Image: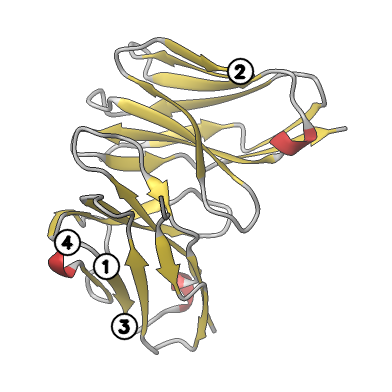
Amino acid sequence: EAGVAQSPRYKIIEKRQSVAFWCNPISGHATLYWYQQILGQGPKLLIQFQNNGVVDDSQLPKDRFSAERLKGVDSTLKIQPAKLEDSAVYLCASSPGTGTYEQYFGPGTRLTVT
Amino acid sequence: GENVEQHPSTLSVQEGDSAVIKCTYSDSASNYFPWYKQELGKRPQLIIDIRSNVGEKKDQRIAVTLNKTAKHFSLHITETQPEDSAVYFCAASIPGNQFYFGTGTSLTVIP
């Protein structure tokens, strides 16, 4: 079974620029998560999708972050404009769906904002 | 929302000794508690988990205990080996499958 795929793996941008990350979950997984992991901290949930609907985006900084999951499969997370404090690893994870608990993480995208 | 606290932040043990990491949570509705191991530059990997209707679970050298009344759960690693060195995260999941992570414990096993 193929795992969660993410791209790019690394990205360096200047502050005020925009950036987008892509995630392809495990086939058939209904639930998709985006996390932000700042160095030395645990992952923080940014947004959770169930199919193509948003379940929870309470911790997403909506003035600069946006995410979509068209057709309930792939997802894109965008930051515009980026700030220095957005430097982090952005992890995507997927899960079969509600009632099933285990989530599987992708390799992450390491973003550096200079 | 849920708040998960994790202690200690760093832990060093001699090879062969046991390691214990403790987490507390705030939301009594949390019903699933996974533990992840994250090696440097890699993704978190699930190592063991426990559901709220179970008090203890063991898998070879790793065990997890849950005290719902006190709202805390712990990871126990016995007979530690150098390859156990990593950062360990606890998490709590509320109904709806939102996950809240602890701040991590950096475990070093000294050969």
- Mark 4 and mark 2, same subunit? no
Residue count near mark 1 (Cα–Cα under 10 Å), binned few <14, some 14–19, many ≥20:
many
Q: In this rendering, would B20 be left or right of A76? A: right
Which residue is drawn at the image coordinates 50% and 71% (left, top)? Answer: A87
- Mark 3 and mark 4, same subunit? yes
Measured as percent of width and height from the top left, residue B101 is found at 42, 41
Looking at the picture, which amino acid does disc 3 mark?
Answer: Gln
Which residue is drawn at the image coordinates 63% and 48% (left, top)? Answer: B39
Q: From the viewer's side, name the closer residue of A79 and A24.
A: A24
Residue count near mark 2 (Cα–Cα under 10 Å), binned few <14, some 14–19, many ≥20:
few
Element type at mark 1: strand
Q: Which residue is mark 1?
A: A75
* Count of marks placed on residues: 4
Q: Which residue is mark 3?
A: A80
Which of labels 1 and 3 is toward the front? 1
Question: Residues at badges 1 and 4 in contact (C-beta under 8 Å)?
Answer: no
Question: Residues at badges 3 and 4 in contact (C-beta under 8 Å)?
Answer: no
**Disc number at residue B60?**
2
Which of labels 2 and 3 is toward the front? 2
Looking at the picture, which amino acid does disc 4 mark?
Answer: Gly
Measured as percent of width and height from the top left, residue A14 is found at 49, 89
A58 over A98 or under it: above or below: below
- Upstream in the sequence, badge 3 or badge 4? 4
**Disc number at residue A72?**
4
Element type at mark 3: loop
Callout 4: residue from which chain? A
